[in-house]
Image (cartoon, rainbow, N blue to C red):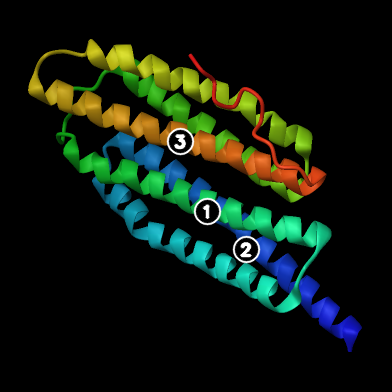
């Protein structure tokens, strides 16, 4: 009986981790659609991202409730307790990353149908999108593989997206004095900031990987990147 209960518990935990990792796939899809929507000024695609954010929220709630149930009924200890704690934090990060994609897409209608685009700013935004995608994917792999070195490398990766975000500010400030130019530039700055936060959330996932592996929680050195 005890063996059967243990098997059922382990299967439930494995299933919840699989669903948690699937949440990353949902974010990656939303992120790719978000970048495409901004680059192509596709308001219909932006609306799809906003509408699908509820699916990511539902995945978060599903995994969160499952983990809480395991805590309440199985009294996990040691490694399993660390994993459950980490997954609770990770799923919150997944939910936030989905929100940040939706936030960018909600800003899209603020831009004119044919906005006064600036190639420098658009190029950096697109690069930030690709970098955010790479970081989310790396965080997913690091968690799946319990790879602390891959998790720690997210700090280096995050520096790249932080730098691109900072480069957006002087470009936006010098974009022009016309109202539509300023409006578009501010919309792009807010969108770039959301991408930068996705990178930060990926680093947070990496810190949870280190916690699962070592049993000690610590913020990665240099992860705040003071300027």
Q: Are marks 3 and 2 in contact (CB under 8 Å)?
A: no
Q: Nearest to the eye among marks 3 and 2: give it.
A: 3
Residue lying at 77% horizontally and 37% vertically, measured from the top left: 148
Residue 225 percent across, percent down from the top left: 54, 20
- Give the residue at mark 3: 197
- Give the residue at mark 2: 19
Q: Nearest to the eye among marks 1 and 2: give it.
A: 1
Q: Are marks 1 and 3 in contact (CB under 8 Å)?
A: no
Q: For numbered disc 2, what is the local secondary structure?
A: helix
As measured in the structure, the alpha-carbon distance from the residue carrying label 1 to the one carrying label 3 is 13 Å
Residue lying furthest left in this view?
Answer: 179
Residue lying at 60% horizontally and 36% vertically, measured from the top left: 203
Decide if residue 142 is on the left or right side of residue 179. Answer: right
Frontmost residue, 121 versus 66: 66
Decide if residue 107 is on the left or right side of residue 59. Answer: left
Neighbour class for label 2 at 10 Å: few (<14), some, many (≥20)?
Answer: some
Residue 12 percent across, percent down from the top left: 72, 73
Give the quarter of the image for residue 178: top left
Residue lying at 39% horizontally and 45% vertically, measured from the top left: 101
- Give the residue at mark 1: 92
As measured in the structure, the alpha-carbon distance from the residue carrying label 3 to the one carrying label 2 is 23 Å
Q: For numbered disc 1, what is the local secondary structure?
A: helix
Name the N-terminal-most of marks 1 and 3: 1
Name the N-terminal-most of marks 3 and 2: 2
Decide if residue 39 is on the left or right side of residue 32. Answer: left
Neighbour class for label 1 at 10 Å: few (<14), some, many (≥20)?
Answer: some
Residue 211 percent across, percent down from the top left: 73, 45
Q: Quadrant of the N terminus?
A: bottom right
Frontmost residue, 45 versus 124: 124
């Amino acid at each position: 009986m005890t063996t059967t209960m243990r098997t059922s518990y382990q299967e439930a935990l494995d299933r919840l981790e699989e669903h948690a990792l699937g949440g990353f796939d949902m974010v990656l899809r939303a992120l790719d659609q978000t970048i495409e929507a901004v680059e192509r000024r596709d308001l219909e695609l932006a609306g799809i991202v906003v509408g699908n954010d509820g699916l990511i929220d539902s995945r978060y709630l599903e995994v969160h409730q499952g983990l809480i149930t395991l805590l309440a009924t199985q009294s996990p200890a040691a490694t399993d307790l660390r994993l459950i704690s980490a997954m609770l934090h990770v799923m919150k990060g997944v939910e936030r990353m989905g929100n940040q994609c939706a936030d960018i897409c909600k800003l899209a209608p603020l831009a004119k149908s044919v906005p006064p685009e600036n190639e420098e700013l658009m190029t950096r935004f697109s690069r930030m999108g690709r970098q955010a995608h790479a970081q989310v994917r790396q965080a997913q792999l690091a968690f799946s593989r319990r790879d602390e070195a891959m998790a720690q490398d997210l700090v280096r990766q995050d520096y790249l997206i932080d730098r691109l975000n900072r480069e957006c500010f002087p470009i936006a400030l010098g974009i022009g004095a016309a109202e539509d130019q300023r409006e578009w530039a501010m919309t792009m700055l807010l969108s770039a900031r959301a991408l930068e936060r996705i990178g930060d959330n990926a680093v947070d996932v990496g810190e949870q990987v280190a916690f699962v592996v070592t049993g000690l929680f610590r913020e990665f050195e240099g992860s705040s990147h003071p300027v």
